[in-house]
Image (cartoon, helix red, strand yellow):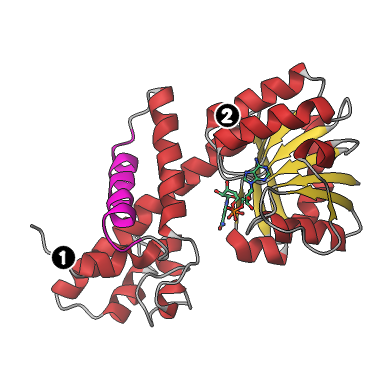
Amino acid sequence: MKVGFIGLGNMGAPMAANLVAAGHQVTGFDLAAPCPEGVAKAPSAAEAARGAEVVITMLPNGAILRRVAEEIHPAMAPGAVHLDCSTVDVDSARAVAEAAQAAGLAAVDAPVSGGVGGAQGGTLTFMAGGPEAAFATVSPLFDVMGQKAVHCGGAGAGQAAKICNNMILGITMIGTCEAFALADKLGLDRQKMFDVVSTSSGYSWTMNAYCPAPGVGPTSPADNGYQPGFAAELMLKDLRLSQQAAEAADADTPLGQAATALYETFVESEDGKGMDFSAMLPRFEKRGRG
Ligand code: NAD
C-alpha cells in the first residue's frame, strides 16, 4: 500500500519502519525527527500525504493534529483514509473526521496501547473509531503494526475507549500503590501481600502484571529503578483527556478527578516527571496522613 506517515517520534518511527519491513511504500514527514531507514522523506506534511491511499498521523496532541489535518486533507486523493493513531481529545478526533468527510476522505481514530516496546515489536493494540469500510481498508496496516485491533464504533470511539481504559489504569495503579504503602505500615510482608491479592478479589493488571513493588511479581519498571515503561507524565496526559471528556459529556468521575490531581502533583511539584507511573508507590511510602 502507498502510505504517508506524519510524526516519526518515539512511536511513529518504529511503526513506520515495520510498515516498510512488511513491503509497504512509506513516505514520511516530521518537523524534527529523522526518517527511519526505508521511509522516503517528504519536504512537508502535504507532500507526504499526496497520492497515498492511507495517511497515518502520530502526533503529540489534538491541536497539532487539527493543524496537520488542515494541511494534508487538500493534498489527499479522493477516497483516501486519514488514520490518526495519536492519543488526543475526543472532540478533536470528531472534528478531524468531519473535516475529512467534507473533503471526500474517510477518517479513522485509532489510538494505541503497548508503548514504545509494542511499536517496535509490532504488538500494539489499536482501538478504532470510524466507518466500517475505512476500518477494513486500514486493517492490513493494523496487522503489521499490532497484534489486535478493535473497531469500537463511529468517529471518536477509539479515543473514548483509550481514555476510559487509561482512567481505570491510573485509578487502579494509585489504589494498588496506596494499599502496598498501608501494608508496609501494618508490617505485612510485600511478597505475602502480592501472593494474597494477586489471587484474590483485589487482583488487577497493575498488581498481577505490572507490580509497583520491586522484587515482587513479574519483572516490571519497579525492578529497574522505576524507569519507564509508561511515564507518569503520559499517564497525566491521558487522565487530563479523560477529565476534559467527562466535563464535556457531564459524566461524574470523582476517582478519575482525584487520580488526575495526584498525578498532576506528582509530575509537576514532586519528582515524578520521567519516572514510571508506578513510582506512586515510593511516593506514598515516604508520606503519612498529614
Ligand atoms: P513524540 O513526541 O516522540 O513524537 C511526536 C512527533 O511528532 C515528534 O517527532 C514531533 O517532531 C512530531 N511533530 C510535532 N508536530 C508536528 C507537525 N506539525 N508535523 C510533523 N511532525 C510533527 O511522541 P510519541 O511518544 O511518539 O507519542 C505520539 C503519540 O502517541 C502521542 O499522542 C502519545 O500520547 C501517544 N502514545 C504514546 C505512547 C508512548 O509510550 N510513547 C504510548 C501510547 C500512545
Residue of label 2: 92
Rendering coords of residue 146 (x, y %): 72, 56
Classed neighbour count for the residue bearing mark 1: other residues with Cα under 10 Å, few (<14), some (14–19), many (≥20): few
Q: Is residue 130 visible?
A: no
Q: Relative to 186, say whether 67 is above or below.
A: above
Classed neighbour count for the residue bearing mark 2: other residues with Cα under 10 Å, few (<14), some (14–19), many (≥20): some
Rendering coords of residue 231 (x, y %): 45, 60
- Residue at 39%, 52% (x, y): give it: 170
User: Which quadrant: the C terminus?
Assistant: bottom left
- Residue at 42%, 64% (x, y): give it: 274
> Which numbered disc flags the more N-terminal residue, 1 or 2?
2
Left or right of 225? Residue 24 is right
Rendering coords of residue 61 (x, y %): 55, 40
Q: Which amino acid does label 2 sit on?
A: Ser
Residue of label 1: 287
- Residue at 66%, 57% (x, y): give it: 124
